[in-house]
Amino acid sequence: MAVKKNGLFGVKCATKTDFVNKVFNQFPAVIDSCTNEVFSKLGEETVKFIRQQPKEQSWIDQTGNLRSSIGYAVIVDGKISQVSSFNQVKQGNQGTTIGKGYAVDIAHKLAQTSVYAGVVIVAGMEYAVYVERMKNKVVLSAGVLWATKNFPVKLEVLRKKIFQTLNKLIKDEIK
């Protein structure tokens, strides 16, 4: 609302400062939550892409350990916010344990850097590189390329999700 005083015009804020502070104080949590959700979805989709390769591009599971060791971890604001379930395939319980430990270790190291958020995709078994390079099978690299290609789309999804969530938050506070 414009107010005239001593021949000068100014603007008087009709919104209470406690409302503004309350909304602004929730912004970081909204951004963190949305980032975790979108990056976790990217991790899930990447693991699914890797695990569902056609037979001619994938490897034959002997124990299930290699396939069980494929998963992801998400970091947001310097903390590990999500770790995939590393679903066990066949008798691959060793792969599940090793994969999850490897993802957490790498994500922890990444979280200690200046990176705000990231997705770590891993194949935890030490012979994963051998299977990929020597046997010419898709283990991890095709999944990382797929995730990299889809990352700009996910960033746009994240941007929209943040704005929608903040708009809803503001509308709910106004009521």
Image (spheres, rainbow, N blue to C red):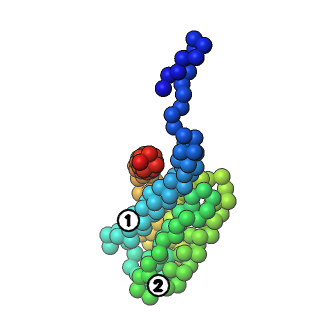
Q: Position of residue 78 (x, y in %)?
A: 63, 58
Q: Quadrant of residue 18?
A: top right
Q: Nearer the viewer, residue 138 or 124?
A: 124
Farthest residue, direction bottom: 91
Residue pointed to by mark 1: 49
Give the CA separation, mark 1 to mark 2. 19 Å
Q: Are marks 1 and 2 in contact (CB under 8 Å)?
A: no
Judged from the image, the secondary structure of the residue bearing numbered disc 1 is helix
Which residue is painted at 47% across and 66% down in the image?
Answer: 140
Apparent side of residue 60 relative to residue 82 in the rendered image (left or right): left
Q: Quadrant of residue 117?
A: bottom right
Q: Which mark is residue 65?
A: none
Q: Which mark is residue 92?
A: 2
Indicate which disc, 1 or 2, sits on the residue closer to the N terminus: 1
User: What's the residue type where badge 2 is placed?
Assistant: Gly
Residue 94 higher or lower than 172, as above or below: below
Farthest residue, direction right: 112
Judged from the image, the secondary structure of the residue bearing numbered disc 2 is loop
Q: Nearer the viewer, residue 94 or 6?
A: 6
User: Quick one: label 1, few (<14), some, or many (20+) residues within 10 Å?
Assistant: some
Q: Position of residue 139 (x, y in %)?
A: 45, 69
Residue 172 higher or lower than 119, as above or below: above
Q: Nearer the viewer, residue 106 or 164?
A: 164
User: What's the residue type where badge 1 is placed?
Assistant: Phe
Which residue is painted at 60% across and 56% down in the image?
Answer: 77
Which residue is painted at 59% across and 53% down in the image?
Answer: 116
Q: Position of residue 120 (x, y in %)?
A: 53, 63
Q: Nearer the viewer, residue 56 or 4?
A: 4
Q: Position of residue 17 (x, y in %)?
A: 57, 41
Q: Is residue 74 visible?
A: yes
Apparent side of residue 146 relative to residue 98 in the rendered image (left or right): left
